[in-house]
C-alpha cells in the first residue's frame, strides 16, 4: 500500500512540475472554458465561447481529519522517501478519514458551440485517489509507520472501515443544450458519457477488527477479524508499481487497461434575466445607430443541479485477486510496512501471522466518487458575482471505490472575458474546518488553490493547488461584427422589402408641378417624377412630420 501511496504522491508533484478537484476559484466563472462542465455538463450550453482547445490542467491536494499538516519536512519526506511519518501532527481523533493525495490531470480536449443552443465537448484525463475512510488511528499508524509504538496498553474495535487507492483514465463526450428560452428565462441540460479505463487499484474493506496493543510491544494482537482485500496489483511487476511520472502519463492513458467501465454526469441549469428597460432617443434620419458591444451574460441569478461520476470500473478475474481474512493473528508494523506492497505479499503475510486467508480470482467493481452538486450564482453588480456551491457524497463507502466529503463553498468573484479572480471560502465536513483559496484566470490560462492556508499558517488539515491552460475562441454577436466593419442586414422600418437607406425620401416641398406630374427632389439631389394621385398623400404626411 505504501508504494501505491507514494506513486499517487509522485503523480501530483511530477505533473505539476512538468472538483476536492473542482477548481472553484475559476470553474464557477462564465469564461472558464471546459472547466465548468466538471461541475455541471449543462454549463457548456449557450456559453461565451464558439470553440475551445484544451491544452492541459492539473489539480492535486490532500484533506484529512487525522491531524494537521506538519510545517517542516512532512511533504518533503513524502516526496523524497515515500514516508508519511512526519506528514501530520496527529490529533486526538480515534477514527479518521483521509484523502491524500487526490489528483486529476486533464489532457488535450476540445469544445465547440453549434449555434447558441447546442455545444459538444471531448475531454480526456487521468485521475487518482488514495483514501482511508472511518479508519482507526492506531491501526493506520501501525500499517504505515514502522517506528510507531502506542503509549501503554490499548484496546480498539474498528468496523465499517475502507481503504481504496485507485488510478484510472477517462474519455468523456459531453453535450449541452438549451431546452427552453425566452427574454427572461432559460433552461439548459447537459450530459457527459465517459469511457473509464482502470490502470490500477488496491482495496481493503473491514467489517470488523478487534485489536489490542501491549506496552513496549510493536505488535498488534488481532481477533474476530473480518477483512476483504482485492487488487489487480498481483505482483511487483504490475505496471502501476513501476511509477507514474511526467514522461509516461500518456503511455498509461493510451496503454492497455486491466479494468473497463462506463460513467456519466447529468446536469440542469436555470437562468433568470429581468426585463431590460431600453431608453429610446430620437435619431436623425440617415444617422447610424451605434449599438453597445456586449456578449456577456446579463442574468440576475442562476441555479443548477448535477450528479457527477456515476459508474464503476470492472476488473476482470484474469487480472484480479481477492482475499477474505478472518480469525486471529498478529500484525507487526515494522514487518507489514516493509514487506506488503501487493496482493501476493498480503496473502503470504496474513497466513504466516495466524490468520485464515481465503483467496480467489473474481470480477471486482471499483466505484466512482458519485457526487451531488447544487449551486446558485448571483450577479451582484456589473462584473461582480457571488456563487454558492454545495457538494454532497452519494457513493456507498462500503464498496471498493472512492468518495468525496460534503462541503459548502461561497465564492465571490470578478469575471470578464479577459480576466477573472475568485475567492472560494469553504467549510468541509471531513475536517470540520474552514478553508480559503484564490483562483485567477488571464484569458485561457489559470492558476489557483481552493485551500491555500497551509502555505502561510499552521494547524491546517489540507491543501490544494491547480493550474492549466486552454485556447478560447470567443463568441461575437452580429452587432459586434458590424462595429468591426462586417456586413449586417440594414433595417427596413416600412417592411417594403428594401432597406431604409435605399428607399427614396422626398423633401417636404414641391419643386415643380406640371400637368398631372409632381416633380420632387430626393435627398440625393436626383429629380424624380411621381404621379400625384398615388404620392400626394405621402408627401403631405412628410410635410406634417417636418412641421412638428
Image: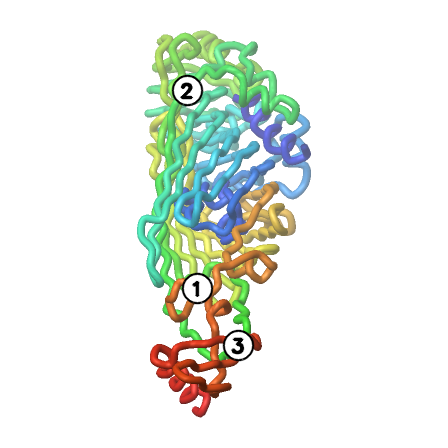
Local secondary structure at mark 2: strand
Single out the mark in the foreground, 1 or 2. Answer: 1
Point out the frontmost of discs 3 and 2.
3
| Of pointers 1 and 2, the one earlier in the residue sequence | 2
Nearest-to-viewer mark from 1 and 3: 3
Distance CA(mark 3)–CA(mark 2)? 81 Å
Whole-number angstrom distance, CA of label 1 to CA of label 2: 62 Å
Q: Secondary structure at mark 3?
A: strand
Which residue is depicted at the point 55% across and 48% down? Answer: 451
Of labels 1 and 3, earlier in sequence is 1
Residue lying farthest to the front in this orientation = 515
- For residue 498, the mark is 1
In the picture, the quarter occupied by the C terminus is bottom left
Horizontal side, residue 179 vs residue 503: left or right: left
Residue 369 appears at what percent x and percent y?
Answer: 40, 34
The percent position of residue 170, horizontal first and vertical second, equals 47, 28
User: In the drawing, does residue 252 fall left or right of residue 224?
Assistant: right
Total marks shown come to: 3
Task: Name the image quarter holding residue 79.
Answer: top right
Instruction: Name the image colouring.
Output: rainbow
> Which residue carries the number 3 mark?
527
Distance of label 1 from label 3 (alpha carbons): 20 Å
Which residue is depicted at the point 34% across and 80% down?
A: 533
**Front residue of 34 and 421:** 34
* Residue for point 54% across, 20% down: 254
The circle on residue 260 is 2
* Furthest residue in direction bottom, as rendered: 547
Amino acid at each position: 500500500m505504501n508504494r501505491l501511496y507514494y506513486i499517487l504522491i509522485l503523480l501530483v508533484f511530477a505533473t505539476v512540475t512538468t472538483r476536492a478537484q473542482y477548481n472553484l476559484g475559476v470553474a464557477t466563472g462564465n469564461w472558464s472554458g471546459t472547466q465548468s462542465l466538471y461541475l455541471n455538463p449543462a454549463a457548456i450550453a449557450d456559453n461565451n465561447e464558439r470553440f475551445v482547445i484544451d491544452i492541459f490542467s492539473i489539480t492535486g491536494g490532500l484533506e484529512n481529519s487525522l491531524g494537521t499538516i506538519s510545517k517542516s519536512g512532512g511533504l518533503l519526506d513524502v516526496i523524497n522517501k515515500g514516508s508519511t511519518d512526519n506528514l501530520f501532527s496527529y490529533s486526538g481523533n480515534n477514527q479518521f478519514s483521509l484523502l491524500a493525495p487526490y489528483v486529476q490531470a486533464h489532457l488535450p480536449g476540445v469544445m465547440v458551440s453549434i449555434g447558441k443552443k447546442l455545444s459538444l465537448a471531448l475531454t480526456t484525463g487521468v485521475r487518482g485517489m488514495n483514501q482511508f475512510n472511518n479508519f482507526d488511528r492506531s491501526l493506520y499508524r501501525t500499517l504505515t509507520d514502522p517506528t510507531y509504538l502506542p503509549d501503554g496498553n490499548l484496546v480498539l474495535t474498528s468496523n465499517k472501515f475502507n481503504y481504496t487507492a485507485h488510478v484510472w483514465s477517462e474519455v468523456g463526450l459531453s453535450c449541452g443544450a438549451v431546452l427552453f428560452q425566452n427574454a427572461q428565462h432559460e433552461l439548459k441540460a447537459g450530459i457527459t458519457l465517459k469511457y473509464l479505463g482502470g490502470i490500477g487499484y488496491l482495496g481493503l474493506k473491514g467489517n470488523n477488527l478487534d485489536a489490542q496493543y501491549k506496552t513496549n510491544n510493536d505488535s498488534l494482537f488481532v481477533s474476530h477479524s473480518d477483512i476483504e482485500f482485492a487488487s489487480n496489483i498481483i505482483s511487483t511487476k504490475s505496471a502501476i508499481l513501476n511509477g507514474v511520472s511526467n514522461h509516461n502519463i500518456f503511455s498509461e492513458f493510451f496503454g492497455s487497461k486491466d479494468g473497463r467501465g462506463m460513467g456519466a454526469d447529468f446536469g440542469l441549469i436555470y437562468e433568470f434575466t429581468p426585463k431590460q428597460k431600453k431608453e429610446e432617443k430620437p435619431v436623425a434620419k440617415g444617422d447610424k445607430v451605434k449599438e453597445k458591444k456586449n456578449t456577456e451574460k446579463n442574468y440576475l441569478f442562476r441555479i443548477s443541479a448535477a450528479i457527477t461520476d456515476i459508474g464503476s470500473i470492472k476488473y476482470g478475474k484474469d487480472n484480479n485477486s481477492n482475499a477474505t481474512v478472518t480469525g486471529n493473528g498478529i500484525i507487526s508494523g515494522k514487518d507489514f510496512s516493509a514487506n506488503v506492497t501487493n496482493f501476493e505479499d498480503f496473502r503470504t503475510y496474513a497466513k504466516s501471522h495466524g490468520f485464515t486467508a481465503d483467496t480467489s480470482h473474481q470480477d471486482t467493481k471499483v466505484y466512482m466518487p458519485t457526487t451531488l452538486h447544487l449551486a446558485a450564482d448571483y450577479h451582484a453588480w456589473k462584473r461582480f458575482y457571488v456563487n454558492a456551491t454545495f457538494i454532497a457524497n452519494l457513493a456507498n463507502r462500503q464498496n471498493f471505490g472512492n468518495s468525496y466529503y460534503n462541503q459548502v463553498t461561497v465564492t465571490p468573484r470578478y469575471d470578464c472575458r479577459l480576466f477573472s479572480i475568485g475567492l472560494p471560502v469553504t467549510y468541509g465536513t471531513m475536517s470540520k474546518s474552514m478553508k480559503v483559496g484564490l483562483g485567477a484566470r488571464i484569458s485561457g490560462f489559470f492558476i489557483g488553490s481552493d485551500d491555500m492556508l497551509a502555505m502561510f499558517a499552521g494547524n491546517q488539515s489540507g491543501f490544494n493547488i491547480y493550474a492549466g491552460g486552454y485556447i478560447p475562441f470567443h463568441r461575437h454577436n452580429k452587432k459586434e461584427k458590424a462595429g468591426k466593419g462586417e456586413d449586417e442586414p440594414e433595417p427596413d422600418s416600412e417592411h417594403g422589402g428594401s432597406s431604409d437607406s435605399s428607399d427614396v425620401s422626398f423633401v417636404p416641398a414641391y419643386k415643380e408641378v406640371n400637368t398631372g406630374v409632381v416633380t420632387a427632389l430626393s435627398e440625393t439631389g436626383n429629380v424624380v417624377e411621381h404621379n400625384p394621385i398615388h404620392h400626394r398623400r405621402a408627401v403631405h404626411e412628410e410635410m406634417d412630420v417636418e412641421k412638428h
